[in-house]
Amino acid sequence: MSACSSDDDSSSSAAGGRNVDVIIVGLGPTGATAANLLGQRGVSTLVVERDDNIYPRQRAIASDEDAHRVWQNLGLFDEMSETMSSDIRVHFKHGNRTFMSMQGNDSRDQGVPGTAFYHQPELERVLRQGIGRFPMVDTVVGMEAVGLNQNADSVTVTLRPVDGGPEQKVTGRYVIACDGGSSSIRKLSGIGLPGRHIEEQWFDIQLRAWYDLPTDAPLDFTFISDPKRPGVDCPCPMGYHRVEYRVNKGESVEQLQSEAGLRGLLAERGIDYDQVEIFRSWGYTFHIRQAERWRDRRVFLAGDAAHIMPPFAGQGVSSGVRDVANLVWKIDAVLNAHAGEDLLDSYEPERRPNVEKLTKFSLAIGGTVMLGSRIASHLRDAVFIAAARVPLLGGWMTGIGPKPLYRLGTSGGFFARGGSRRRSLRGEFIKQPWVSGADHTPVRLDTVLDNRWAWVGFRESPIPAALAAAGVAEIRLDRASAIADHNVAAGHHVDTERILERQLRRGRVHAVLVRPDRFIYAGDREMTRSDIERVAAAVVTGPADAQLSNAGSR
């Protein structure tokens, strides 16, 4: 087998009898990101995908800073950015009046764009080609999972060719199910997907715009917040354009897909049917579901296989990326360090709270857009316009403020167990500023962190000897004044914007211990000896493919 290209032409016949560390089922953005993360860590991996080629329909259009930081550290975000739009403005419009506008650029000091829009097939092309850098990651297409069997040490997946042929078996230490909302792996594992779907049907039109949108031009995304027909209008990169509408009573998807129906709908948005190329149109309903559990022994669910959220906040792809970024380093620690299996139990408790918060956030946006009453809609408009004029509140509303902060759940998570401090930074992303060393060359902090445990702090709080002995890296910080004095010590770094200094001051610490996924395990004032021993057991001393371990982290 070979790592897949954009055409996914790898042979399915080579799958049978394989033994690997990890089997990934599904090669959408979540599965492809997981494959890159595992390859970066030198973990032998087999990726199984049902479709022969990248799905041509643009299902997702948006990603955020959390996903961008993961892709940056995989060395792929620069190429992705070439066809992305990251200068995003979001508008809520009722008739001819815009009652609120928001900027999508803020990333809460993560050092990457806060929001980006893309053409999903192009995003997947970059992710899949990235897998080709890693010889320990193989892909097989045209196969679907039809059987699953686990024992104490491994899990065997039975594969069947989609176009017919004999079944084959592959065995791995773990399986990551990235095969979407209808996940066969989830069903084979006997895991339910409770929740609900919104009965209201919507209609989506994907077209190629009559103009070419430059990647550096601002992109205006509009929520059509009109009770007569709510919808979404989204110009996309590479000249694509999507419009979505609620299907009103008395209408059917079949009627709307006719030429007359399409002409009428596009005319509502001022789009001339004769001046665009329509690629696809389809009807759909929203689902809100979460798997009963995200782990069954050696099987893990990620992305839509674990949770399906409403589309209004555009968090589907980013949530899947968050899942596998949280999971992969833990699998690596169990496989290649001395971490116990209980480390993997922390996956769901850390990730589920964020998914639940984002689901509520997305529903709140949907509720704002889909008010059915004309009177309620005008009242909503007036409230938002008035609130936006209030100092501080207006800035919070029109920026990243309403979006839930991505913090991991610490109850049941892999964090220090020492006494909880009111301002603890546990479960929080470490910020990513530009930092400069003795040669004054600025680099992103993640380039220095690499994919490893790291002690980051000022000289007042050096790394504990036990952590250093276990292989934890030490990133020593000098105060910003050291740059002005040309006095940065060898091996030290300075954050001239003082972003890290402010974060540590807010947590009332001089140093933090950072996990391989860039989340803070604990501050220097809240770790016990047992906390240090837990970390020492989970440290992987070095990536198997060092030359790619920090590729693109710039």
Image (cartoon, grey):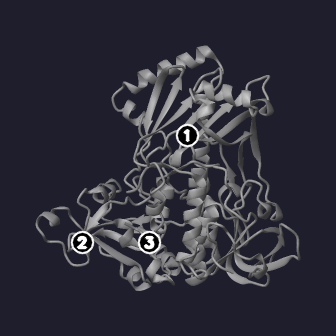
**Camera-side residue of 505 and 238:** 238
* Marks 3/1: CA–CA distance: 59 Å
| Amino acid at circle 2 | Gly
Discs 2/1, front = 1
Is 400 situated left or right of 478 in this image?
right
Question: Which is nearer the N-term, disc 3 or disc 1?
Answer: 1
Residue 444 found in image quarter: bottom left
Question: Which residue is at 62% across, 54% downward?
Answer: 352
Q: Is residue 327 visible from the viewing direction of this image?
A: no
Q: Which mark, residue 528?
A: 3
The image shows residue 502 at horizontal and vertical percentages of: 29, 54
Asked if residue 22 can be seen in this view, the reply is yes
Q: Determine crowd level at label 3: few under 14, some 14-19, many 20+ residues with C-alpha closer than 10 A.
A: few
Q: Which quadrant holds residue 192?
A: bottom right
Whether residues under marks 3 and 2 lie with C-beta atoms below 8 angstroms apart, the answer is no
Mark 2 residue crowding within 10 angstroms, few (<14) / some (14–19) / many (20+): many
SS class of the residue under badge 1? loop
Q: Which residue is mark 1?
A: 209
What mark, if any, has residue 299 been given in the picture? none
Along the viewing direction, whichever of 51 and 16 lies nearer the viewer: 51
Distance between the Cα atoms at labels 3 and 2? 31 Å
